[in-house]
Image (tube, grey):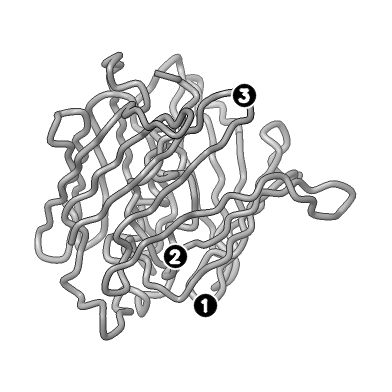
Amino acid sequence: MKKCLLGVFLVLLSCGNSDDLDNQTDNLNPPQAKIQTLTIQDEEISNGNATLLEKLDFKFEYNQDKLVKVWDIHNNYTENLTYNNNLLTDIIINGYVYPGLEDHVPLNVQRKLSYDNSNRLIKSENPVVANGAKSYTTFEYPSADIIIAKKYTQYVNNTVSQISLDKIHLNNGNVTKVEKGDVNNPSVLTNGINYEYDQKTNPNSLIDRNRILGLFDYSFNLFMLQDYSQLSKNNVIKRTEYVITNGGEYLYEPTNFIYDYQNNLTNKIIYQYDWPTTPSLKVSAIYGY
């Protein structure tokens, strides 16, 4: 298994900052059409032939409108979510690190989420101290269309170091741009991502929005868990990375999604990475409702 494989396709969370977006549906998207299953498979494509590398088969459990559990039927992943007063407060994930499931490297992720008086997420903390430190992320809302996420490391002597900054721009319920700070100087913006959308409803909008923010720094990268486009009400059709140099934006890497829809909900998403000297990687996600 290639350790450089980029895992995709799990987060399943959405929406911006307005509660009105929670109820946005259309005639083809009844509120009960929540995701029930998700199959992810990685394939290596060489000379037109596909070889299966890894496969995950997820199921989703709800308590009324709240997602409370996600698990892989092969026992590679279990995620439990806890709520208090209808707000997501705890996320615990156990299983094995992906990609590379065959190595059975233990996966242990915990997050505690805190909110302000307007029920906006303001902090996501990893309560576990590892290597003499623990991490947390704060969230600021300078306007209705901006979210600023700042990640910190707190050491056992209580000194704190900021290690990243993400400035998230929203428009009409979609994340249009994310500007990223230099890891060594977070106040200096060095690169970012632009997004373009279709008019289809993002199936992730049917699940709690705070899950993507609360886990955004998590490296278990199923469906680009660090990709803020999951907060959006529509589906991404183009994702363009850029660098900032001399005050301008310069193209770095475009990423295109291939979507297949049924009843205006995502049926399948395909990512394919083509490398000039090595076999291609094809990652597919198949949703069930």
Q: Is residue 280 above or below residue 174?
A: above
Residue at position x 57%, y 59% in the image: 238
Asked whether disc 3 touches disc 1, contact meaning CB atoms under 8 Å apart, the reply is no
Among the two numbered marks 3 and 1 on one chain, the one whose residue lies closer to the N terminus: 1
Quarter that holds the C terminus = bottom left
For the residue pair 89 and 269, the one nearer the viewer reads as: 269
CA distance separating discs 1 and 2: 13 Å
**The residue positioned farthest toward the bottom in the image shown:** 27
What kind of element bears circle 3?
loop
Residue 277, numbered circle? 3
Q: Amino acid at mark 2?
A: Asn
What kind of element bears circle 2?
strand
Q: Is residue 270 above or below residue 120?
A: above
For the residue pair 23 and 112, the one nearer the viewer reads as: 23
Residue corresponding to mark 1? 172
Q: Amino acid at mark 1?
A: Asn
CA distance separating discs 3 and 2: 31 Å
Question: Where residue 244 sits: x, y (%)?
Answer: 79, 48
Q: Is residue 220 above or below residue 18?
A: above
Residue 129, numbered circle? none
Question: Where residue 198 sits: x, y (%)?
Answer: 49, 71
Q: Is residue 31 left or right of residue 64?
A: right
Residue 235, numbered circle? 2
Residue at position x 37%, y 72% in the image: 201
Q: Amino acid at mark 3?
A: Thr
Q: Is residue 63 left or right of residue 273?
A: left
